[in-house]
Amino acid sequence: MFVKRWKKRSILKHIERLLERPPYPIRPGAISTIGIIYDYNLPKEFISRLEGLGFRMNQIKTIGLLPDDIPPHNSWDVFYHASDFGWNGQHNNPALKAFSEENFDLLIAYFKEPKWPLTMATALSKANFKLGLIPSMESSFDLIIDVKIQQLDLLILELKKYLSQLNKLPNGRY
């Protein structure tokens, strides 16, 4: 028990160090790749709504956090567990490593409850522009949209508004 608390403390310190590093400069131009980090259940209509904004399915990659008591699914979706992280935030999940090394134009942290494995995956990402839903985690994101997870219509409307103001929507639409 005591060792688990030490391990969690070392991981949280590593998250703080990752968040203190200078942000990547925002690249000009439209968004061509999107990464989504979510907590176990991502509504499929969220991805279809993103397609309604002009993004294609092959431009969107997702990774989800599974609870430790649920085994990985045999599906196309990519998942990781909190137990994949070791001391100082080192992880041994090849899917998480590939996801965090990808230079996404937009990373959407689609979770409302701040769990350390989700925060760690967000901090590890080399995404150019990070969008989140939790106002208390302002150091983790470039843009925060404070809506509930269930308010999918409002989230897509706000996302469309901000991305069009930043000239980031594909094909200059909207």
Image (cartoon, rainbow, N blue to C red):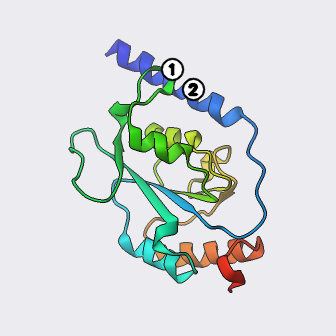
Q: Based on the displayed image, in which of its 4 quarters is residue 69 positioned?
A: top left
**From mark 2 to mark 1, how far is it between C-alphas?**
6 Å
Residues under numbered marks 2 and 1 in contact, where contact means CB atoms less than 8 Å apart = yes
Position in image of residue 81 (x %, y %): 34, 39
Locate residue 8 relative to residue 16 in the image: left or right.
left
Q: Is residue 109 visible?
A: yes
Residue 152 in the image: x percent, y percent?
47, 74
* Residue 49 x, y percent position in the rendering: 48, 78
Q: Mark 1: which amino acid?
A: Ser
Residue 14's label in the rendered image is 2
Say which residue appears at 55% left-offset and 66% top-offset.
147
Task: Compare residues 139 and 98 and report the one nearer the observer.
Answer: 98
Q: Which residue is mark 1?
A: 10
Residue projecting furthest to the bottom: 174
Q: Quadrant of the C terminus?
A: bottom right
Report whether 92 appears left or right of 74: right
Q: Label 2 is placed on what type of residue?
A: His
Q: Where is residue 106? Give x, y as percent.
A: 62, 60
Q: Quadrant of the N terminus?
A: top left
Helix, strand, or loop for circle 2?
Answer: helix
Q: Residue at x 71, y 33 (%)?
A: 20
**Whether residue 115 is visible:** no
- In depth, the one of 95 and 42 nearer the eye is 95
